[in-house]
Image (cartoon, grey):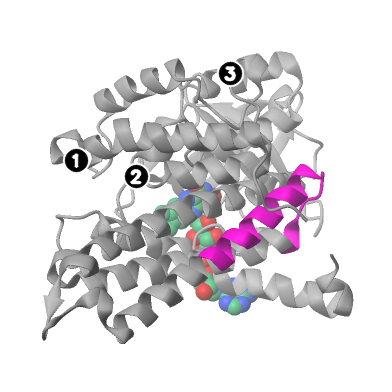
């Protein structure tokens, strides 16, 4: 068993690290580079993205033939972790959610001419995408089978009625993946579609304010009032909506874990700098056993999550859906991130609670990690079912 990164991937990883250190961290340190939603301002983002392209680090997850770098999931894991050393990082490399997950699934399932139309503009960074599945109660949330938005076939078109909410980027996206009910079949009742923002029959009813920093395009509540989608823009077969959802969300959850590991490491890096200098009651904070236990535990949890992430990435590269491995990584990494940022804030005292460091930004963001993309409880429920079915097979090599 070899835990070392292959040379080509190590080369990408070290170049991403260098780029983040030299080009992105200095921007993050200056509030003038932020927009009103506490994210990187669009003109600044455009400038950095040009430099990322020149450095040959653009869209690591996409094929070289389409302008990406063609890295396998294992390579993405190593590089995404480096990117999210900065809270601005992933979007600068076009490796941020939700476009990252959209690109991965469209690259996998679309025929080449459809890729030119729907995928290439996202890879190029010219348009944003969104994934519309979640609905307000009593519609689909943790349980997609409760979906109420319908798509009804009329000749060669589908007509959509319903409501979605918390759709990331909904206010700015042009290319939407929509999941809607097409029959009452309990297993094959959902179907996935693509639509363009310019098509009539839908509207953003409101932008939902959230606890954490906003993505470009915010989080939208969307109403569908007769949106017409040509059948040629259906994804996979009629009834494959749940399958598409799993294909979209599995890798996307894992790339979250890759980024979150980087964010957790940065939080501990900030705490380490503080406790190395700060003194109380005659000694450095870093020399106190209580402080060391806190740091040791948080650092250990980050590494546990990272090993789970790397194993799941390796399984995806082998062609597996890695359902079990991704669920475990999602639970452990989201909780390790929350714990690491909380520990870092505690150790930095008042400074940790201030806006002088990105810790408070990370803390508000990290709270989402435990409930978005499948709450921890839902992943544990899935794991329990797998264990009850597989028993000792659950721990196969
Ligand atoms: C910032 C943000 C961005 C988002 N972006 C998107 C997006 O782009 N597209 C999209 O479609 N959705 C998006 N979502 C929605 C997100 O995926 C859902 O919030 C999530 O799937 C949970 O669904 P819900 O909110 O309806 O929670 P519910 O289903 O109402 O569950 C509430 C809580 O109940 C508990 N729970 C649920 N089921 C079980 C169970 N079986 N056993 C034990 N406990 C359980 C969990 O603790 C869960 O957090 C986003 C949400 C947020 C907050």
Image disc number at residue 141: none
Query: How far apart are labels 3 and 2 at the CA level?
Result: 26 Å
Front one among 169 and 138 = 169
Q: Is residue 166 above or below residue 116?
A: below
Callout 2 touching callout 1 (CB < 8 Å)? no
Mark 2 residue crowding within 10 angstroms, few (<14) / some (14–19) / many (20+): many
The N terminus lies in quadrant: bottom right
Residue 307: within the magenta? yes
**For residue 294, what is the image quadrant?**
bottom left
Return the x and y of residue 344 as percentages of the image width and height: 30, 68
Which residue is at a point 85% across and 68% down the rendered structure image? 396
Query: How far apart are labels 1 and 3 at the CA level?
Result: 29 Å
Return the x and y of residue 75 as percentages of the image width and height: 62, 39
Tell me if 313 is positioned left or right of 214 in this view. Answer: right
Q: Which residue is mark 1?
A: 36
Q: Is mark 1 within 8 Å of ligand 1?
A: no
Q: Is residue 258 above or below residue 299?
A: above
Q: Secondary structure at mark 1?
A: loop
**First reached walking from the N terminus: tag 1 or tag 3:** 1
Q: Which residue is mark 2?
A: 86
Q: Is residue 190 visible?
A: no
Report the predominant secondary structure element of the magenta stretch: helix
Q: Secondary structure at mark 3?
A: helix
The magenta span reads 303-324
**First reached walking from the N terminus: tag 2 or tag 1:** 1
Q: Which residue is mark 3?
A: 120
Q: Secondary structure at mark 2?
A: loop
Callout 3 touching callout 2 (CB < 8 Å)? no
């Amino acid at each position: 068993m070899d835990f070392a990164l292959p040379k080509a991937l190590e080369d990408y990883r070290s170049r991403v690290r260098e780029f983040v250190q030299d080009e992105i961290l200095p921007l993050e340190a200056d509030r003038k580079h932020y927009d009103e939603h506490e994210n990187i301002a669009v003109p600044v983002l455009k400038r950095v993205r040009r430099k990322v392209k020149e450095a040959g680090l653009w869209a690591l997850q996409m094929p070289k033939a389409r302008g990406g770098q063609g890295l396998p999931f294992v390579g993405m894991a190593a590089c995404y972790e480096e990117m999210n050393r900065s809270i601005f990082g992933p979007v600068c490399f076009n490796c941020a959610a939700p476009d990252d997950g959209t690109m991965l699934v469209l690259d996998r399932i679309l025929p080449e001419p459809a890729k030119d139309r729907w995928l290439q503009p996202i890879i190029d960074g010219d348009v944003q995408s969104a994934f519309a599945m979640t609905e307000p109660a009593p519609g689909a949330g943790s349980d997609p089978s409760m979906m109420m938005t319908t798509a009804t076939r009329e000749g060669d078109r589908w007509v959509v009625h319903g409501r979605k909410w918390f759709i990331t980027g909904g206010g700015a996206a042009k290319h939407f993946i929509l999941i809607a009910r097409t029959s009452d079949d309990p297993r094959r009742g959902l179907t996935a579609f693509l639509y363009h923002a310019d098509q009539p029959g839908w509207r953003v009813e409101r932008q939902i304010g959230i606890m954490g920093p906003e993505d470009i395009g915010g989080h939208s509540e969307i109403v569908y009032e007769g949106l017409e989608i040509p059948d040629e823009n259906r994804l996979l077969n009629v009834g494959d909506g749940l399958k598409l959802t799993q294909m979209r969300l599995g890798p996307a959850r894992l790339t979250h874990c890759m980024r979150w590991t980087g964010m957790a490491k940065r939080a501990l890096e900030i705490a380490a700098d503080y406790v190395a200098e700060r003194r109380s009651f005659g000694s450095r904070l870093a020399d106190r056993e209580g402080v060391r236990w806190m740091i040791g535990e948080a650092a250990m949890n980050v590494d546990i999550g990272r090993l789970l992430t790397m194993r799941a990435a390796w399984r995806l590269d082998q062609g597996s859906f890695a359902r079990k491995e991704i669920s475990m990584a999602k639970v452990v990494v989201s909780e390790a991130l929350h714990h690491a940022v909380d520990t870092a804030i505690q150790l930095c005292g008042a400074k940790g609670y201030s806006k002088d460091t990105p810790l408070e930004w990370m803390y508000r963001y990290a709270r989402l990690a435990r409930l978005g993309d499948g709450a921890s409880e839902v992943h544990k429920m899935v794991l329990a079912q797998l264990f009850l079915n597989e028993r000792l097979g659950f721990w196969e090599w």
